[in-house]
Image: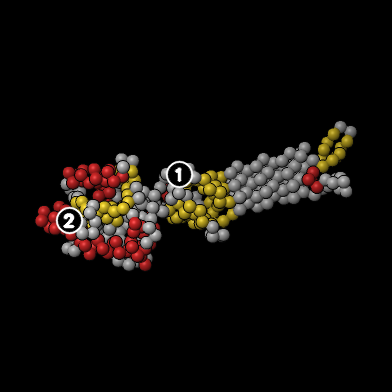
Amino acid sequence: MFVDEITLHIRAGNGGNGVARWLHEKGKEYSGPAGGNGGRGGDVYIRAVRDLGLLLKYRNIKEFTAENGQDGMNKSMTGKEGEDLFIPLPLGSIVKNLESGKVYVLENEGEEVLILEGGRGGLGNEHFKASTNVRPKEFTLGKTGGEADFFVELQLVVDAGFIGLPNAGKSSLLNALTNAKAKVGNFQFTTLEPNLGDFYGYVLADIPGLIEGAAEGKGLGHKFLRHIKRTKFLIHCVSVENEDVLAVYDTVRGEIEKYGNGIDQKKEIVILTKTDMSDEDDVAKKLKALKKRNSEVYSASIIDDESVKQLGATLSQFLA
């Protein structure tokens, strides 16, 4: 199961309380104020890591809390500050504070972003000492740390993404080229979430299939289009089963161009899939038709090891 969005409740640490304490010297009990200040509460940071399955691990956690600061101590000693909390999130995460509306984007591996500040420590009674108040009893409590619900949405950062209408053979190709175990079936929307595979250190993603109207949110539209925003280049799959391969190609390209956001400018290659289901003349005719739209057109059948091998070599050149 792949989780690409989740809501987390996150709290920064509270500041420790200031205290009222007194110096205890020989022969001079309670000789002066010596209450220390409270320590500051821990801040909360999010950290970008290369682990696309990380949100799945948080399904049953949902709440994170940084350490509170310690209360002040005797002899004017400040309490210990609470430890900062670092929450690992997948590279490509978009994190929105649902209270303030502020949005944070994790674009670089190892990047750390402050999202909540810990509360300030309270003041001890020594802070209030003055010529007119030599024995102050005042102290203040620590401040509450920041707290909010955060919506985390993952936009995949992958090297290449398989796109195309439902049942175009994307999952089967991903399985043939990588160690992925994507679900395969002869019906639309078998792929409801992106499947990922490792191709010699490159990440390939099988994105849920498009339908006409996806740019307006039909089918899995916005979910699909969101995931290909950060894909370096697109592998557009068109099944040989389609009589009019140009119409099928144009349907997908039309939705991508309507959506825009730079997706329509990404480099693209086209794969005519399931070529074992037709004769050589039909395959050649459809390859020629697709080349009217894109010069980089290839063919593959998952039951033909040689064609899969050749496709792998082609992808390696584009990814290098």
Q: Nearer the viewer, mark 2 or mark 1?
A: 2
Place residue 224 in its image quadrant.
bottom left
Q: In the rendered picture of this protein, how many numbered marks are placed on residues?
A: 2
Q: Which residue is mark 2?
A: 287
Please identify the quarter of the rendering in which residue 260 is found: bottom left
Residue on which disc 1 sits: 109
Q: Is residue 156 above or below residue 78?
A: below
Task: Quote the CA–CA distance across marks 2 and 1.
Answer: 40 Å
Neighbour tally class for label 1: few under 14, some 14-19, many 20 plus, Cα within 10 Å: few
Q: Is residue 24 left or right of residue 116?
A: right
Task: State which quarter of the image contains the C terminus.
Answer: top left
Judge by depth and name the residue closer to the eye, 219 or 264: 264
Residue 283 point in image, percent of width and height: 14, 55
Q: Is residue 313 visible?
A: yes
- Crowding near pointer 2: few (<14 within 10 Å), some, many (20+)? many
Please indicate, yes or no, whether residue 192 appears anywhere in the rendered image.
no
Give the mark, 2 or 1, whose residue is nearer the N terminus: 1
Residue for point 79% across, 44% down = 126
Question: Camera-side residue: 158 or 138?
Answer: 158
Identify the amino acid type marked 2.
Leu
Q: Residue at x 83, y 45 (%)?
A: 129
